[in-house]
């Protein structure tokens, strides 16, 4: 579930409010949005993908609240990690070109044709 | 749970729009329907509860697409017919393969970059967030109006008996909206009962309830017990491919017999989970395998990486998460090549529609379902545009009624939507109820679900945005569960996604569809499977990349 909106990183663009498919956030004028309905978070990581400031962290646990530490997450490269995977963000190029699904059937194992 | 939600302003009239084609939903089926309708010259409005770009099962993941060159179609059709256990249809498979193959270059022309092999693009899978980003941008460029964060609550039915629009809620500004349309496409996805399967919590069976309220029919709702493996700590990302290289252990560290690989996790995991916790380790993955699956199924690794687990060397607990009809097969019954329903002006596409025609009784899985969204979306969009065009200006002159029922309007008493949702989940999420179906168990669940349905017909509390949405979601989930279990009860056999412990074999005499409908009293009816002779499919090279 969504566990962090970093006040130091957030630029109050409200993109997360706009894109969250389950309407978890509420906008606050001139401030970082708030996590208003955490119980509706489905842990899809889409807000992380869309956050231009790498300010959000969705913990992998979808059914329980876990405590997170912003500094540790930041140092471990966890903030904005999904955007790196997708190749989204300034100066990056979409990683869709690296999709390897078409190579699955070449692997030894269940997908070999 | 107490929750934060703005109140709804009932004093103002709210947004009122008129259009030729209204598309409900925000995933790829909705996007393809909107594109096809717009390409046919229709004015198009899309309304989605979430955001067209992040909503639904496709956006939140990567996916294969069953997009094969024509030379491979016949072999694929034969393979799919075998897997469909007599309920899928050669002609629909052929036209889906043809349409999907023809459509993939369009995605590229809209800005999606496919991987290349020997310098040529390979267009048979996608990264979900990027795919949906590209589709959204394309639609906005064509002048399609998209209302995000605007769940449809009910359909509007015209005096001529046709569906003529929808009414819903703009959930971020607390007002209602109403869209009058010449035709409506239902593309709101399937139903995973808020199980938190990846991206599926927007898929709450809304189309099934709205369609039946308008007089339409469903089909194959018994083929709804689709579960998929996920790490238990995450219990969300349901991607099975990496687990093809897993070993499994019980709580004592004893290896679990997984049988032949091609039988998948269904063969052992449901029963093993009833006995106790199951742990997995992807220790059969070679470096060559890792290099591929980490790029094809990055989303399966993201939660594990965040949790600091190395899945190749460490054991981690696994579970099964209900995907319901999202990766199952049942949905709104379609009765024409244009994905028309039995009600004029109403079309269905993607997981909202039955996928029996292409998947039969089994899970289509990601690849076929992705191809189905692309093709059924286009057929429904084009069909809706044609219907609206034939109506012309008459469309807007018709008197309309809003036809929503339970969870929206009722009398006497009151209900707690969150409690109803928890009660429905208690009947449909557990493996022992839904995966292992028995007459006794289904009847016991149906007694509770029918009582919940009666409760939902009392007066809902319509003061906050979330309250309104939640009440209607509770009704859609309850309705879907009732259809699924009634259909499962009537089908006295085990056929792929309807597993009856008390009827463990397939009964060849039951090789037919089950149509269903009704609200307070659910009815079911046999529908024969039509058979078609093979036909030769030819695709002219000049058609590749062209609009249908």
Image (cartoon, coloured by chain):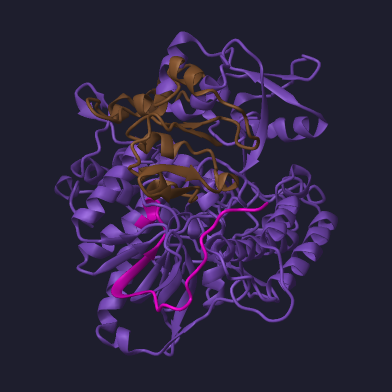
From the viewer's perspective, tell me whether residue B478 is left or right of residue B127: right
Q: Residue at x 28, y 70 (%)?
A: B385
Q: Quadrant of the C terminus of chain A?
A: top left
A41, above or below B235, in the image: below
Considering every residue shown, the one lying at the far left of the view is: B542
Residue A44 can be seen in this image: yes
Q: Range of the magenta residues?
A: B1-30
Per the rendering, the colour in which chain B appears is purple
**Is residue B170 highlighted in magenta?**
no
Q: Quadrant of the N terminus of chain A?
A: top right
**Is residue B7 highlighted in magenta?**
yes
Q: Position of residue A96 (x, y in %)?
A: 31, 30
Residue A105 can be seen in this image: no
Per the rendering, the colour in which chain A appears is brown
Q: Position of residue B395 (x, y in %)?
A: 31, 84
B383, above or below B537, in the image: below
């Amino acid at each position: 579930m969504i566990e962090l909106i970093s006040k130091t990183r957030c630029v109050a663009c409200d993109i997360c409010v706009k894109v969250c498919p389950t309407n978890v956030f509420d906008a606050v004028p001139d401030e970082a949005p708030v996590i208003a309905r955490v119980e509706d978070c489905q842990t899809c990581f889409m807000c992380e993908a869309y956050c231009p400031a790498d300010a959000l962290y969705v913990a992998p646990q979808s059914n329980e609240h876990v405590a997170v530490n912003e500094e540790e997450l930041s140092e471990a490269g966890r903030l904005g990690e999904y955007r790196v995977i997708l190749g989204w963000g300034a100066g990056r190029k979409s990683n869709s070109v690296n999709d390897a699904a078409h190579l699955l059937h070449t692997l030894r194992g269940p997908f070999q044709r | 749970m107490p929750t934060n939600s703005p109140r709804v302003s009932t004093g103002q009239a709210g947004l009122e729009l008129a259009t030729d084609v209204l598309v409900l939903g925000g995933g790829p089926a909705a996007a393809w329907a909107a594109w096809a309708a717009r390409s046919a010259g229709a004015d198009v409005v899309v309304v989605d509860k979430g955001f067209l770009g992040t909503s639904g099962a496709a956006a939140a993941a990567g996916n294969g697409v069953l997009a094969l060159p024509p030379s491979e179609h016949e072999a694929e059709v034969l393979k799919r017919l075998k897997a469909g256990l007599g309920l899928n249809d050669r002609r629909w498979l052929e036209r889906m393969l043809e349409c999907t193959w023809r459509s993939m270059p369009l995605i590229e022309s809209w800005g999606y970059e496919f991987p290349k092999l020997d310098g040529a693009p390979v267009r048979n899978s996608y990264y979900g967030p990027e795919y949906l980003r590209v589709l959204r941008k394309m639609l906005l460029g064509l002048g399609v109006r998209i209302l995000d964060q605007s769940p449809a609550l009910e359909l509007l039915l015209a005096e001529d008996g046709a569906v003529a629009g929808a009414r819903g809620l703009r959930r971020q500004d607390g007002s209602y909206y109403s869209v009058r349309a010449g035709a409506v496409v239902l593309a709101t996805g399937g139903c995973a009962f808020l199980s938190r399967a990846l991206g599926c919590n927007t898929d709450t069976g809304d189309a099934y309830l709205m369609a039946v309220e308008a007089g339409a029919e469903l089909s194959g709702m018994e083929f709804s017990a689709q579960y998929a493996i996920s790490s238990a700590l995450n219990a969300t990302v349901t991607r099975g491919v990496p687990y093809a290289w897993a070993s499994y252990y019980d709580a004592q560290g004893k290896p679990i017999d997984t049988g032949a690989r091609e039988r998948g996790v269904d063969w052992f995991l449901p029963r093993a989970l009833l006995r106790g916790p199951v742990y997995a380790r992807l220790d059969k993955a070679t470096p060559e395998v890792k290099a591929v699956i980490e790029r094809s199924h990055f989303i399966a690794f993201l939660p594990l990486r965040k949790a600091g687990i190395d899945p190749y060397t460490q054991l981690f607990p696994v579970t099964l998460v209900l995907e319901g009809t999202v990766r199952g097969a049942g949905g709104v019954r379609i009765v024409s090549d244009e994905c028309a329903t039995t009600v004029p002006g109403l079309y269905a596409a993607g997981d909202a529609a039955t996928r029996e025609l292409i998947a039969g009784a089994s899970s289509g899985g990601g690849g076929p379902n992705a191809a189905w969204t692309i093709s059924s979306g286009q057929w429904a969009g084009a069909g809706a545009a044609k219907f609206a065009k034939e109506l012309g200006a008459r469309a807007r002159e018709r008197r309309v009624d809003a036809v929503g029922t339970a969870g929206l309007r009722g009398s006497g008493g009151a209900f707690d939507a969150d409690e109803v949702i928890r009660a429905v989940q208690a009947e449909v999420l557990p493996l022992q109820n839904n995966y292992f179906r028995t007459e006794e168990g289904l009847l016991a669940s149906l007694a509770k679900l029918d009582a919940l349905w009666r409760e939902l017909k009392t007066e809902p509390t319509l003061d906050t945005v979330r309250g309104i949405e939640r009440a209607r979601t509770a009704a859609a989930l309850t309705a879907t569960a009732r259809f699924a279990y009634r259909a499962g009860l009537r089908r006295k056999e085990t056929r792929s996604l309807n597993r009856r412990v008390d009827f463990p074999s397939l009964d060849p005499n039951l090789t037919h569809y089950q149509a269903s409908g009704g609200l307070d009293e659910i009815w079911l009816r046999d529908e024969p499977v039509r058979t078609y002779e093979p036909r030769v499919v030819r695709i002219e090279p000049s058609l590749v990349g062209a609009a249908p």
